[in-house]
Image (cartoon, helix red, strand yellow):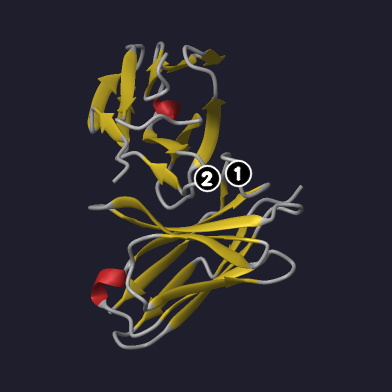
Amino acid sequence: KAGVTQTPRYLIKTRGQQVTLSCSPISGHRSVSWYQQTPGQGLQFLFEYFSETQRNKGNFPGRFSGRQFSNSRSEMNVSTLELGDSALYLCASSLGAMNTEAFFGQGTRLTVV
Amino acid sequence: TQLLEQSPQFLSIQEGENLTVYCNSSSVFSSLQWYRQEPGEGPVLLVTVVTGGEVKKLKRLTFQFGDARKDSSLHITAAQPGDTGLYLCAGRVGSDKLIFGTGTRLQVFP
């Protein structure tokens, strides 16, 4: 059974640009959550999607957005990139909306220069 | 704001020593999980505890969920260099988002 796949693994962008990250959950999993991880702030929750609907949202500015497709794949988008957006972005897949066990991808390392 | 505080923040020990990591909150969790993360990789689920007072063992790792389901501990016996990594606890209150603890970075020297 394939795990959670995130693409790309590494990304370098310039300030002001936008970026789209992709996440394919484990087959059969319908919930996808996104997290930002930085050395200073730890793992910060961005948003959670279940059956194409956003269930929960973290305290991030509107520049951070996401969506989920009918096949449960998810994308997150960050517009007008800032230097502080440099981080490891992690996607987690869960079986259902109330299922607490999350399985993570390897992450996308975003560097904003 | 739900917070999961972990202690200690950093731990540096010699191979063969025992250690305990704590995860505390003022919130009651329906379940709590422990993850280990290595540099540049995503966290890997180690265990889920559900029942207050529950104890689970995974080889040399022992996990305990507090009776009130507000706290948890991870005890490692005879630590090995392969145990090195960032240990994270995580929990969800009701249907709210899954939140993560502040993390404990463990370094085990040969």
Residue B5 percent across, percent down from the top left: 27, 34
Question: Across the whole image, how many numbered discs are drawn on residues?
Answer: 2
Residue denoted by label 2:
B95
**A100 versus B72 height, above or below:** below
What's the residue at 30%, 40% (across, down)?
Answer: B3
Contact between marks 2 and 1 (CB within 8 A): the answer is: yes
Residue A78 percent across, percent down from the top left: 41, 77
What's the residue at 60%, 66% (across, down)?
Answer: A53
**B19 versus A84 height, above or below:** above
Label for residue A98? 1
* Residue type, numbered disc 1: Met
* Secondary element at tag 2: loop
Residue A96 percent across, percent down from the top left: 66, 48
- How would you rate the neighbour count of disc 2 (Cα within 10 Å): few for under 14, some for 14-19, many for 20 or more? few
Chain of the residue where label 2 is placed in the rendered structure: B
Out of B12 and A33, give the one closest to the viewer: A33
Out of B46 and A55, give the one closest to the viewer: A55
